[in-house]
Image: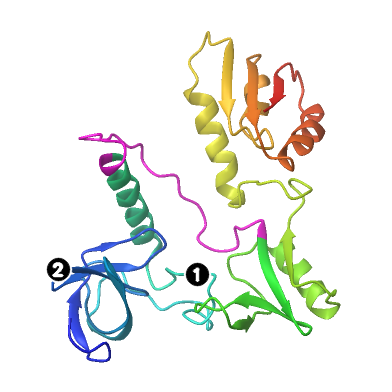
Amino acid sequence: MGSAAEPIELTISELAYGGDGVSRHEGQVIFVPFTALREKVRVVVTEVHKTYSRARLVEVLEPSADRVVPPCSLFTQCGGCATQHLAYPAEVRAKVAQIESALKRIGKLEKPVLRPALTGPDYAYRNRITVHNRDGRIGFLGADGRTLVDVARCLLAADDVNQKLAVLRERPRPRPHYSIRADEVRGEAFYQSNRPLAKLLQQQVVAAVPEGIESILEGYAGTGFFSKPLTERGIRVVGVESSAAAVPVFQREAPKAELLEGRFEDR
């Protein structure tokens, strides 16, 4: 591949999980952050591994029509976002392509059939963020995974989450990191982070259950995100969940549902 510091020109052939552009050079896969599909770019290889390399974008020689100006001034510095340089429809198409590829490669499905992707707002949607504290400075880890980037407001986070971030920045407590979250679910259990799409996802799954189904076994039941609305249909749900944090949250949240007749089993 030549010298690690020698610029090379590549054409991005796909987008990998996580947002990096993918190209091939001299028989090796190269991952290039902050690139778009079919872009011609000049890069410098920064890491060489046995089966792949990583490169730093130096110049976009032929930009994609999907490339946009990132709205956040900290993009490429902050490690929280990887695709702000892409128009939202292009990001959705890339993720659909990744799912289709996984179903073919891992699921061994020759022609997987996917429903149209559910989409929502591309900003101000997250109901939780994780920030770090270094000597009273609150921020996100940088793109290098080490540097602390001082962030006063996250464009991905919902307004109420950003309000809590502002309070924390004024009165930081002596902890290395914090999980700032809205009040959908209390505690440390997992909950869908995309607030607008969470309800749509829930509705889609519940609607997919045929009429006449009396019992459902739900693995990785979590906080009962799917179990609760299914029981509201009168379906007996047996949930299986190993997370010690999720089980009490499920048990606490379940009584709020009307006609909750399902059964939750801790594994």
For the C terminus, which image quadrant? top right
Packing grade of label 1 (10 A; few <14, some 14-19, many >=20) is: some
- Give the magenta range: 104-128
Apparent side of residue 208 relative to residue 39 in the rendered image (left or right): right
Look at mark 2 in the image and give the residue it sits on: 27
Residue 232, position in %: x, y?
Answer: 68, 21
Total marks placed: 2
Give me the residue at 33% from left, 51% from top: 98
Residue 114 location (% of width, % of height): 33, 37
Q: Which residue is mark 1?
A: 81
Mark positioned earlier in the residue sequence (2 or 1) = 2
Residue 69's place in the image compared with 115, above or below, is: below
- Asked if the magenta segment contains residue 115, the reply would be yes
Position of residue 186 measured from the top left corner of the image (x, y, whole percent): 79, 47
The quadrant where residue 199 appears: top right
Task: Using residue 209 as the reference point, say whether residue 192 is left or right of it.
Answer: right
Colour mode of the rendering: rainbow
| Rendered image: mark on residue 134 | none
Q: Main secondary structure of the magenta part?
A: loop
At a point 54% along the width and 78% down the height, the residue shown is: 78
Quarter of the figure with residue 118: top left
Residue type of the residue flagged with mark 2: Gly
User: Residue placed farthest to the left in the image?
Assistant: 26
| Amino acid on which the number 1 mark rests in the picture | Cys
Q: Residue at x 32, y 83 (%)?
A: 57
Q: Nearer the viewer, residue 24 or 255?
A: 24
Question: SS class of the residue under badge 1?
Answer: loop
* Dot in front, 2 or 1: 2
Q: Is residue 217 above or below residue 81?
A: above
- Residue 224 is a magenta residue: no
Find numbered disc 2 in the image and state the secondary structure of the residue it sits on. Answer: loop
